[in-house]
Image (cartoon, rainbow, N blue to C red):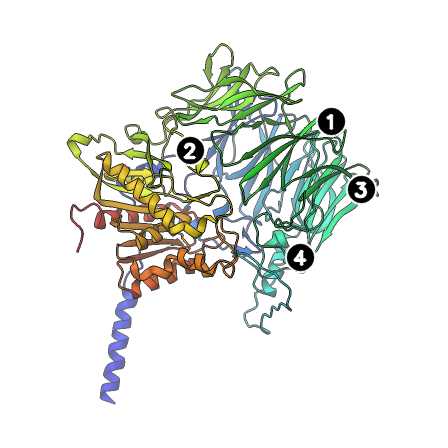
Amino acid sequence: MVRKTAFLLSLLASGAAWAADPAPAYHRAPDAIARILDAAPTPSVAVSPDHATLAILGRENLPSIANLAKPILRLAGYRIDPSTNGPAEVRVQWLNALSFKNIASGRTARVTLPAGTRFTSPDWSPDGRYLAFVVQESDGLALWIAGRDGTARRLVRGLNAAFGSSFAWTPDSASIVARLVPADRGARPAAIDTPTGPVVQESMGRTSAARTYEDLLKNAADEALFDYYFTGVLGRIDIASGTLQPLAAKGMWRSFAVSPDGRYLLTERLKRPYSYLLPAGFFPTEVAVQPMAGGAGGRVIVDRPLADDLPVDFDAVVKGPREVEWRSDAPATLLWAEALDDGDPKANVPFHDRLVTQAAPFDAAPVELAKTVKRYAGTLWGDDGFAMIVDREWRTRTERRYAVAPSQPGTVRLVATRNYQDQYGDPGMPMVEENAAGKPVMRFTPDRKAVFVTGDGATKEGAFPFLARMPVAGGEQTRLWTARAPYYESVVSLLDDSGRRILTRRESAKLAPNYVIRSVRGGGAKPITDFADPAPTFANVTQRTITYNRADGLPLSGTLYLPAGYDAKRDGPLPTLLWAYPSEYTDAKVAGQTVDQGNRFTRPRGISHLFLLTQGYAVLDDPAMPIIGEGAAEANDTYIKQLREDAEAAVEAVVKLGVADRDRIAVGGHSYGAFMTANLLAHTDLFRAGIARSGAYNRTLTPFGFQAEQRTYWQATPTYTEMSPFTYANKIKEPILLIHGAADDNSGTFPIQSERMYAALKGNGATVRYVVLPNEPHGYRALESTGETLWQMTDWLDRYVKPARPVK
């Protein structure tokens, strides 16, 4: 009895001592990094539809962990803030300042908002007179509008933004259609503390594969919460009087769109039964159209069941009408796609999709506009004589572009067939701008014989965006203007019908991005904004694109950054971090394309690995890690071999340049880059240490496909096994830092992936640290989490990479 009492007392004593230990605190990033994190981010810009005004939008800095720690609900793939009935903090980039700048005169009108106002979703009215936006209030979300003179006012409270976008302008700019919280909603469903029975799911022999999704419904209580927070009513708000006209009663209104003539409303409504294996986009869905004025004249376009029987292939789609939209250039004409292969891209059919249109009053039979060889990807609208349809095939990375005449259904002309990963051969895309109804249409030349085209202009020497003219009738494009070194200058909008004056966003390696009025013919440039360098301490960092070859001769490249003031002769080789992310290709020539990044302005934000430049490290950023499967070959069947060869080539390149010490090189990556990191540590001896953030390491936990892999685990068991670094955890001898957000919201990268990888490494005697960031999603947001991540990365590399000799 004495022994037993003494043992219990010792347990209590040790427990008391353990309980008295202080809770772990967040580390602050090193001072040089912390100062940059504290700097205000560069504002964003929204150009008015008439191209006369810039809305300059001040952005909040990183949110606090207290904001991220507020209660949220994770329902059917969505994360919402129950206090506002809108997206959770981690899903929003909040804005905190608004001003309007006249492009011609340069005059600025600042909008005065209540102190502490946070807002999001800015959207110009079709006539450009007002900017609407959503303001976060203490008990919900409100819709506001601001005029270009700087005045602002609230229109309505009680927006329901659980599905995301919560309002849309009518084409006449006189009103706004919004999704609102029902006035009679009542109290939130009570929590069920004591279960009333088990949760039962069953499948009676029907094939119903599902990829690995996050934040799914789990039980009847979740279903009740989903109904409560996502049910809304649709109404039209007059912006002059603020009066509200009801348009649709309670429903799960996932999306809605007003016709270009303002007479009809297209809606997408979710219905029961829900799924515990799929997010809301797969739930039973009714797509319908109704008159804005009420009464007869509406119709249901499709009422489809739960989409739980799709093939796992990336190009698999539902049966029946899908992707219903308004034809932007017609008063009230619907377009939708229908699969001709029962939704299965593997089906051997001459055409996989067809597109049909139906004009108001929607009582005539739909008209077939065109068929596509592969899966329909989108339409760019122009006029009765010209629209462009795009299809894509994931397996081959092939894209086709077709010219169609909407007034002559069935008249289809193939414009181009290309590998959409081909940077050098990218012809650009037609410019799309809002028309008078606020709908996106292609921008025609004054004679309407051509449309304006913009593209990135990728070449080996660098990317130089361009403006071109593409004949509607077919033929070669004509270049009108191309950016010149040392600038990367992209076309934002045309300032006249002929395209002689354009608004561009210009940057260089040394100049922060700013907006410029450019004369296409004369070459003159007039700055419109003067945004400062947000991290001037990086101004003296050197940046260069390096090229090298893989063992099989494939050309590769990466961007090499060296710390400010570094001198190779004086300082010698540096500890170096390779930070990468593998990509899959079907064409070796495309995989080997190099685009010099020397005209890009690079400043780190958030959890960027480039902050390590302030700590004395060289960084090889985004070294090419192509995984190629040409013809019938599957890229992932040789993933490990190709990954190893990619890494060997990158290491040899930086060592040969004399800037990296072969014995002091680390590898790191985020998400699929973390997966890569663990594999390289398991299968090579190239690196002293690794950093793996928010990765997935066991592919048996994503058995119905992952990343670019379409095959299931049972179709490619050896590949899944060999690609999983979890399988080879016993071979990882170099120190590895695992970091994961506790609330990861990315498909497939559940926190358990890092949890079990840590257990496997620890059980095999590895040197490993596992850091869990509370409340953080796949990409970390809070200021405290950001500082912690950067401190952990710096500390890990300082311990295991920076020392001249390996740590014993």
Q: Judge whether residue 28 can be spotted in this image.
A: no
**Residues at marks 4 and 2 touching, judged by CB atoms closer than 8 Å:** no
The disc, 1 or 4, on the residue closer to the chain's N-terminal end is: 4
For the residues labelled 1 and 2, say whether their Cβ atoms are less than 8 Å apart: no
Kind of residue at badge 4: Leu
- 4 or 2: tag closer to the N-terminus: 4
Q: CA distance from mark 3 to mark 2?
A: 56 Å
Tell me which label, 4 or 3, sits earlier in the chain.
3
Q: Is residue 465 above or below residue 218?
A: above
Question: Mark 2 is on which residue type?
Answer: Gln
Q: Position of residue 136 (x, y in %)?
A: 54, 43
Instruction: Identify residue for label 3.
Output: 294
Residue 593 got which mark?
2
Q: Nearer the viewer, mark 4 or mark 2?
A: 2
Q: Find disc 4 in the rendering and name its residue.
A: 306
- Above or below, 773 against 762 in this view is above
Q: Tag 2's secondary structure?
A: loop
In primary-sequence order, the first of circles 1 and 3 is 3
Q: Report the amino acid beneath label 3.
A: Gly
Q: CA distance from mark 4 to mark 3?
A: 29 Å
Q: Quadrant of residue 47?
A: top right
Residue 140, numbered label: none
Which residue was labeled with disc 1? Answer: 384
Of circles 1 and 3, the one toward us is: 1
Residue at the spot x=48%, y=19% of the render? 482
In which image quadrant can residue 353 be found? top right
Q: Nearer the viewer, residue 762 or 266?
A: 762
* Foreground disc of the pair 3, 2: 2
